[in-house]
Amino acid sequence: MTGLDKTSHLVRRSSRLRHHTLRRCAAVFALTPRIKRQEMAATGEPNDLSSEMELDAFRRLFPIRFHERHLLESIRPDGRPLGRARDTTLMLGAVASANGSALAKIGCTTMLAAIKMEVMTPTAEVPDEGCIAIDFHMPPICSPLVRPGRPAEVAPVISKQLSDTILSSGMINLKELCLVSGKAAWMAYLDIYCLDADGALFDAALLSAVAAFSHLQIPVVSLNDDGRIVLISDDISGAMKEKEPVNKETTKLKLNNLPFSLTCVLHKNYILADPTSEEESIMETFLTVVLDSSFQLVSLNKPGGPGLAHTSAIQDCITLTRQRVKELEKILKEAISDMEVD
């Protein structure tokens, strides 16, 4: 056998082996009972190591087919029904040095939000209003797709989307941030750090922002001898007597119509609520619905992708969002209660 013949033989043998492996992967997936697949996905418990490896290979090689076989059974690889969001937790006061903070987790997606209040001079156009500045950060630790030294492209997009949502929802009356009309008002700096990016980033970021504003304590300030607004520290008792404070005690910011969101993935005739990063990477059509606590529509956002085949899909997403708003309101109330008890 010549060298060329040997090479051709090896190529044919490698091709046959590859096709055999792919057929075996597909067969293993098809024969694995649904409940066993759910257990393997949810608990990671190895049943048959070779079968599990072949199932993982099929998932990596044919991600769309892998997910569509689950969709046929109205289940997802992590065991969730199509319309159910992942487990969600909230912790208020996560950053002691901030005026308001919260840690939000939706599945593995984790956001840390912190608010710092500073006194500013209001603009001439709105002399009796304060201001809010929102920055969304994605450090390299949150995802292997984010490279050191290169800011994530999605970060400024989410920052703008958060700012538009919070201001348009009417959650915060900017006039309540005014201290002395035309002279002093509060500037609220909200920084949100993505610690783990596993899908539905905007939903988790918005939840952490709302929770941080719910935890916000507005500091006590006073006028100094120069007529400027200064912060009054808790450990300075004499300052309170020398100058009448502008606001007599730390106060909570009054919030109205809290906005909550739900991102859905639309694939063929299926709607998947709260997608993971894996689902987002292989499916093209996304729709994010924002409703306030009165179930009024705040915004709809569809970032590119194919057009919606049926307008009824939008209504279905809104219905899922209404259910999600009830869940998130309950979670936020429980987090506030836990904070008050502590």
Image: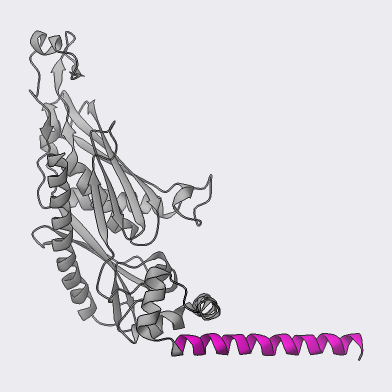
Is there any visible trace of residue 212 in the rendered image?
A: yes
Rendering coords of residue 182 (x, y %): 14, 26
Q: Residue at x 24, y 51 (%)?
A: 90
Q: Residue furthest right?
A: 2
Where does the image place residue 2, in percent across and percent down from the top left? 92, 89
For the point 17% across and 27% down, the residue is 219
The rendered magenta stretch, by its main secondary structure, is classed as helix
- Residue 18 in the magenta stretch? The answer is yes
Where residue 37 sits, quadrant-wise, is: bottom left
Relative image position of residue 160 (x, y in whole percent): 31, 50
| Quarter where residue 66 is shown | bottom left
* Along the line of sight, the residue nearer the viewer: 78 or 45: 45
Asked which colour scheme the image uses, the reply is: one colour
Please, is residue 317 above or below residue 299 in the view? below
Say above or below: 302 vs 169: below
Asked if the stretch drawn in magenta spans residue 255, the answer is no
The relative height of residue 166 versus residue 242 in the rendered view (above or below) is: below
Image quarter of the C terminus: top left
189 on left or right of 57:
left
Rendered-image quadrant of the N terminus? bottom right
Q: Nearer the viewer, residue 21 or 284?
A: 21
x then y, percent, for residue 180: 11, 24
Kindly tell me whether residue 125 is visible in this rendering.
Answer: no
Observer-nearest of 292 and 123: 292
The magenta stretch is: 2-30
Identified at 18% across, 75% down, the residue is 315
